[in-house]
């Protein structure tokens, strides 16, 4: 967590003095709140006189903040800057009415804070959670991971924007804090949440950062983008954030509590001199109080949770262990999260079991502004990985040999973007923009080339660097000191990708380095170059990729060269990162390394950029899927969006629908993931540059192309059902055009229809004679119920898509 070098320093000093150590004296909460308010000042329409601060001074502080952010380009700076700009505040903003001689507008009308907000119906947008767990009752050790499991089951990992825990800031039991931390962060890792939104309030820096972040989220709230805060512990973090927030934004936030106000109305006032639920409501949060959850979800016999222990899902088995640690299976606080996404005020254990084990869980809900919008980007997700290079779990081949996973069994879905020229053509600022955007769009892998194709050896980077001494891969141009050579920039970009929760698939060299020039990589230097890469990057979140789009077994593009490079990587990479090979167009890596070769761990194919059908694209993949011994297979280059057919714009340009169709056909044919690409982005082209391939948009605009914002819907859909037992099965389709996949257990089946219409499906493989029918929209990630199969007998059915665009038919056995 980085902080800006302005009034935050004072706030941190207050917090550090107030909260350090077990049994430390109670902090001056009001003073702390004033300092935090200065960190995230309210927009100019603040209520006059609030907390003794003049609105004109408040506006002036906001303008100063906007100015201090002008040179900052990390995700937090952009979030704060966007929040200010939505309120009309920039570094050049004039004083508001009533300040500096301007006429004063009528004061805003205040809402009665005792009004009870209506219950959320079916789901919410952004979600925040405040919990304790570091003192008193052990139930939080169970409720916290259950809350995250509930959100994850609905695919709401991206919606969680702030989670403060260990919120009993007056004192902290070390054992309690340790167990709560494991419950929260362990669940975040296992259920795929972004670790950067979690804050340990028992740590002074964590408390300051958590309150600052929550204040920014409150200030970003509008009637169309509400925030729901689940209050499952002491009220201090929420109160501090609200006290520092824009009063006009507070009414767009719901505060969910159960029983007598969560942590009860008087506990804080009596024992600690803190604030109650009513105090938070008095600051303008919309009261959403539901019945006490202890009667339905409180202490119980652990046998009620046996389904978790016997699920066969490592994450659910771990969840059982946290309930067991709490000794009484009390998950009452998790009822508030269940309410927040369903509107059900009194859920039962049976309701939780249905949600956690049901194969018909709703597909994920998403923000209306999914992707990157001009209004507000969604929080960076980075797929299912926690943020931070050291937080990226290793990736391995699944036990069945078909997919990729983490060592604890959690699935890893390869959703890559093609950034071939990232290291060569982008400077660090450009790289951060690109990587932050792709992380926010849900990508999990970035494909980039260390020795780039187009002038990568002799055309300097924007920083003036080249990668090699005398074009010799055995002599990387590494200079003493940080930040002064090509490889320092590569380090920075890989680290930033890892920090955003994404892995980098590191192409060692483009194929031109062994074939058609400049041919600098050969059997004499390949191993040495591999040793350099393995030693320098093996400890980061990477995959290593050999080859680079040249015809196999021709010229210098031989197994001997790439095998030597792989041997060098494995000799110095002590982390056993996976290795693959990128083949020539319309070829498979098996042309170079057959399936029984130990050189690579998973196969890659390169589909096509020609004007061919989606079915034709899958031919290579289907062939690889059928090879023995089994290996995962991924298409690492196919159907770029905004790329001319056959490299000739006279034949037309590929669109987002082409990119989507290729992705769904490949994954529904058995691929372990998919690689998206954009014609401008892969070459990082902008006006004034040489364009090796035809291009229409600058890469800075192209990163927002439609297809890029839609790819994560495929990942989310696949992860919403059982993962490792999915198998492609075209025999399901009895008529019509599509691609089908199902679970081996018969619990679900899906069929992708590229152009809508009707599809005949043999449902006899499903474990139900009346499957639940849903139509999933690949463009938005939304679902809508469908009609049953025209009343026909079990084993046959015809289903008609909502329109003539592409759709996924989802059949769930119920």
Image (spheres, grey):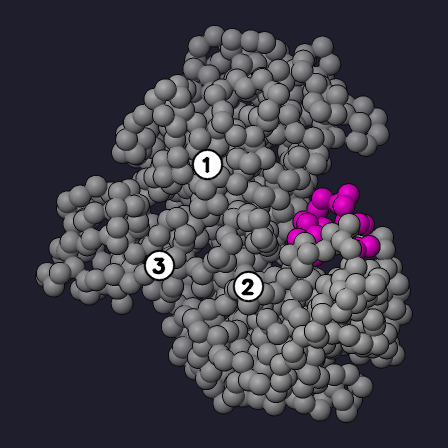
* Cβ atoms under marks 1 and 2 closer than 8 Å: no
Segment colored magenta: 63-84
- Residue 652, disc: none
Around disc 1, counting alpha carbons within 10 Å, would you say few (fewer than 14), some (14 to 19), or many (20 or more)? many
Q: Is residue 806 visible?
A: yes
Task: For mark 2, give the secondary structure.
Answer: loop
> What's the residue at 50%, 52% (across, down)?
370
Q: Is residue 78 magenta?
A: yes
Q: Is residue 497 left or right of residue 589?
A: right
> What's the residue at 71%, 44% (across, down)?
73
Around disc 2, counting alpha carbons within 10 Å, would you say few (fewer than 14), some (14 to 19), or many (20 or more)? some
Q: Earlier in the sequence, mark 3 or mark 2?
A: 2
Q: CA distance from mark 1 to mark 2?
A: 29 Å
Q: Position of residue 685 (x, y in %)?
A: 57, 26
* Cβ atoms under marks 3 and 1 closer than 8 Å: no
Residue 31, compared with residue 743, is above or below; it is below
Decide which of 686, 136 is in the foreground and name it. 686
What residue sits right under mark 2 in the picture?
Answer: 225
Q: Give the mark toward the camera: 3 or 2.
A: 2
Residue 680, compared with residue 744, is above or below; it is above
> What's the residue at 51%, 54% (across, down)?
369
> What's the residue at 41%, 52% (across, down)?
780
What residue sits right under mark 1 in the picture?
Answer: 676
Q: Position of residue 58 (x, y in %)?
A: 80, 65
Q: Is residue 39 left or right of residue 114?
A: right
What residue sits right under mark 3 in the picture?
Answer: 783
Q: Earlier in the sequence, mark 1 or mark 2?
A: 2
Q: CA distance from mark 3 to mark 2?
A: 20 Å
Q: Is residue 213 magenta?
A: no
Q: Give the mark toward the camera: 3 or 1.
A: 3
Residue 262, compared with residue 175, is above or below; it is below
Q: Position of residue 172 (x, y in %)?
A: 77, 76
């Amino acid at each position: 967590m980085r902080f800006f070098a302005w009034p935050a320093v004072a706030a941190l000093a207050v917090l550090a003095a107030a909260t350090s150590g077990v049994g430390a004296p109670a902090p001056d909460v009001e003073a702390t709140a004033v300092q935090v308010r200065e960190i995230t000042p309210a927009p100019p329409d603040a209520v006059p006189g609030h907390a003794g601060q003049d609105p004109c001074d408040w506006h002036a502080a906001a303008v100063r903040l906007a100015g201090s952010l002008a040179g900052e380009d990390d995700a937090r700076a952009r979030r704060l800057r966007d929040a200010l700009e939505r309120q009309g505040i920039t570094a050049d903003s004039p004083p508001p009415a009533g300040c500096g001689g301007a006429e004063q507008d009528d004061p805003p009308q205040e809402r009665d804070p005792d009004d009870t907000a209506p219950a959320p119906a079916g789901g919410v947008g952004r979600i925040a959670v405040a919990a304790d767990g570091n003192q008193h009752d052990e139930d939080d050790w169970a409720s916290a991971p259950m809350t995250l499991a509930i959100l994850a089951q609905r695919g709401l990992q991206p919606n969680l924007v702030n989670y403060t825990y260990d919120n009993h800031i007056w004192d902290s039991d070390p054992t309690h804090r340790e167990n709560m931390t494991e419950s929260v962060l362990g669940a975040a890792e296992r259920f795929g949440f972004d670790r950067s939104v979690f804050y340990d309030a028992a740590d002074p820096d964590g408390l300051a950062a958590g309150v600052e972040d929550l204040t920014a989220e409150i200030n970003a709230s509008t009637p169309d983008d509400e925030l729901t805060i689940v209050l499952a512990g002491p009220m201090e973090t929420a109160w501090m954030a609200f006290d520092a927030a824009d009063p006009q934004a507070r009414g767009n936030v719901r505060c969910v509590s159960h029983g007598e106000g969560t942590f009860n109305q008087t506990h804080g006032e009596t024992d600690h001199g803190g604030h109650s639920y009513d105090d938070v409501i008095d600051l303008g949060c919309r009261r959403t109080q539901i019945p006490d959850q202890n009667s339905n979800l409180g202490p119980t016999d652990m046998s009620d949770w046996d389904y978790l222990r016997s699920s066969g899902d490592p994450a659910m088995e771990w969840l059982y262990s946290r309930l067991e640690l709490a000794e009484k299976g009390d998950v009452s606080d998790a009822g508030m999260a269940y309410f927040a996404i369903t509107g059900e005020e009194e859920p039962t254990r049976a309701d939780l079991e249905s949600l956690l084990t049901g194969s018909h869980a709703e597909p994920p809900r998403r923000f209306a502004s999914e992707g990157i919008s001009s209004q507000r980007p969604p929080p960076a997700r980075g797929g299912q990985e926690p943020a931070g290079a050291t937080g990226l779990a290793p990736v391995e081949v699944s036990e069945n040999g078909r997919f990729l996973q983490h060592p604890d069994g959690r699935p890893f879905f390869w959703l890559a973007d093609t950034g071939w020229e990232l290291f060569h053509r982008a400077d660090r600022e450009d790289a951060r923009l690109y990587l932050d955007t792709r992380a926010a769009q849900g990508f999990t892998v970035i494909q980039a080339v260390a020795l780039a194709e187009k002038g990568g050896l002799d055309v300097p980077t924007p920083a003036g660097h080249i990668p090699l001494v005398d074009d010799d891969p055995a002599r990387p141009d590494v200079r003493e000191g940080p930040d002064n050579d090509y490889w320092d920039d590569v380090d920075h970009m890989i680290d930033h990708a890892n920090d955003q929760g994404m892995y980098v698939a590191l192409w060692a060299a483009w194929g031109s380095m062994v074939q058609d020039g400049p041919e600098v990589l050969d059997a004499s230097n390949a191993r040495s170059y591999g040793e350099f890469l393995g030693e320098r990057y093996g400890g980061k979140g990477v995959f290593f990729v050999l080859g680079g789009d040249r015809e196999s077994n021709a010229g210098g593009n031989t197994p001997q060269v790439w095998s030597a490079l792989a041997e060098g990587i494995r000799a110095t990479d002590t982390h056993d990162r996976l290795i693959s090979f990128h083949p020539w167009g319309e070829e498979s890596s098996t042309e170079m390394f057959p399936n029984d070769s130990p050189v690579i761990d998973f196969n890659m194919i390169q589909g096509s950029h020609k004007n061919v059908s989606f079915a034709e694209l899958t031919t290579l993949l289907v062939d690889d899927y059928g090879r023995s011994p089994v290996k995962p297979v991924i298409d690492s280059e196919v159907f770029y969006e905004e790329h001319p057919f056959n490299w000739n714009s006279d034949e037309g340009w590929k669109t987002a629908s082409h990119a989507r169709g290729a992705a769904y056909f490949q994954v529904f044919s058995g691929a372990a993931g998919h690689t998206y690409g954009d014609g401008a982005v892969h070459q990082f082209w902008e006006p004034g540059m040489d364009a090796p391939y035809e291009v229409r948009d600058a890469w800075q605009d192209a990163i927002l192309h439609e297809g890029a914002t839609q790819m994560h819907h495929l990942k989310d859909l696949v992860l919403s059902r059982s993962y490792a037992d999915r198998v492609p099965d075209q025999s399901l389709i009895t008529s019509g055009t599509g691609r089908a996949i199902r679970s081996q257990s018969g619990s679900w089946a899906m069929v992708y229809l590229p152009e809508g219409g009707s599809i005949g499906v043999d449902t006899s493989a499903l474990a139900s004679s009346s499957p639940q029918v849903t139509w999933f929209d690949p463009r938005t990630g939304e679902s809508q119920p469908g009609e049953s199969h025209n009343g026909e007998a079990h084993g046959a059915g015809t289903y008609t898509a909502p329109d003539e665009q592409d759709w996924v038919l989802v059949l769930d056995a119920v």
